[in-house]
Image: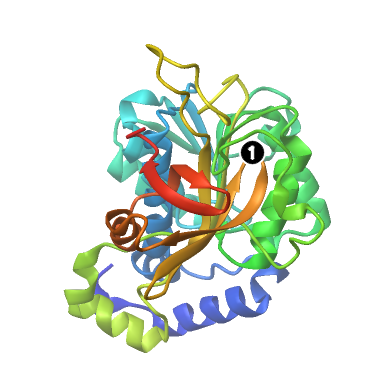
Amino acid sequence: MKWTELDWPALDRLRDGFLHGGAAKGPYWESETALASYDLTYGERIGWKWDHVLRELHLRQWQPTSRTVLDWGCGSGIAARRVIASFGPERFDTLHCWDHAPLAADFATDAARRQFPGLDVTTVTPGFFRGDDSIGLLLISHVLNELSTEALAGLRDLIARAEAVLWVEPGTSETSRGLGLIREAVRAHFHVVAPCTHQQACPIFTEGNERHWCHFFAPPPPAIFADPDWVKFGQRAGIDLRSLPYAFLALDRHRERGPPARSSEPVGGESALPPLSRIIGRPEFFKPYARWLNCDADGLTELTLPKRNNPALLKALDRTKAPLVYRWTREGNQVRDGRPWGEA
């Protein structure tokens, strides 16, 4: 698919369905050109979200142990291709693709076979869902607002068969809080790898936090802003190419513990490290200070960083494109210093 070959009527129809709920009414993939057009444009933007999630998982030194992948609700298959490329195709033996539209599953299968010729790539048969064997690594992407109660229950059954789950959704309040409810329902059986820095109940659902939701922002590749095809696409589609809000959940059945939620044991007589924290959304910057919603093992807290306390940290927070996981040095709700996860 070339930019000059985009099926704009199909892209307009798909976008309208995603925005206004039409996607929840049944299969919406009508042609291979629609899938190819989506894969080059909206699918690639979803791929950038997956890239940012995968960057964080590598930062947390997490890798899948299963050699089998199921891309459930695969669409054009962008999620599976990003995950397999990120961890390396040599780590996997089999990729299963499933979508409620067989046309999409076939497209995803063909695309994965072209990119990973040594991988066994298959479409899922109905009998696959009637079994109870492990399904390995389960990938789910941008489906939550399309699922009926029955479909969600079926997906929950699949999660119960998974060794690990990577799930990415749009960063809206509705989808994010829906994903949080699933986290609460399954966290007794899985280690929550990310985005959380703790294994406690999600504080988003604590009374008084109703206006908050767990979401983040992925940086698009800088080169697209000088790419005439992407610039024209953004103008024609009416979207802000800079904005990529997302929510996600990474679960691992076998990993007993991840990054310490509190502090590590002192080493060599030094003080224990501060607990890990996660910035929800992104910081707001004002002339004399920055502020953000912070999530850690103690819950949600609004923190501030006065510029006079640490101008270098404030500048770094404004410029970083990395996942916003930090260890803060604080006095109450005021930050004095901070180190990103991986440097502490």
Residue placed at 44% from the left, 71% from the top? 34
Q: Is residue 332 visible?
A: yes
**Disc 1 residue type (three-letter):** Ala
Q: Is residue 151 left or right of residue 309?
A: right
Q: Quadrant of residue 60?
A: top left
**Residue 25 % position (x, y):** 72, 70
Q: Is residue 320 above or below residue 243?
A: above
Residue placed at 60% from the left, 19% from the top? 256
Residue pointed to by mark 1: 297
Residue placed at 39% from the left, 71% from the top? 288
Q: Name the foreground residue: 119 vs 66.
A: 66
**Residue 111 % position (x, y):** 36, 49
Q: Quadrant of the N terminus?
A: bottom left
Q: How many marks?
A: 1
The crowd level at tag 1 (other Cα within 10 Å; few <14, some 14-19, many 20+) is: many
Q: Quadrant of the C terminus?
A: top left
Q: Is residue 25 above or below residue 269?
A: below
Q: Is residue 62 above or below residue 18?
A: above
Q: Quadrant of residue 54?
A: top left
> Looking at the image, what colour scheme do you see?
rainbow
Residue placed at 58% from the left, 39% from the top? 124
Q: Name the foreground residue: 26 vs 179.
A: 179
Q: Is residue 292 left or right of residue 40?
A: right
Q: Is residue 283 visible?
A: no
**Residue 15 % position (x, y):** 52, 78
Q: Name the foreground residue: 210 vs 288.
A: 288
| Secondary element type, mark 1 | loop
Q: Quadrant of residue 6?
A: bottom left
**Residue 318 % position (x, y):** 33, 63
Q: Is residue 212 left or right of residue 277?
A: right
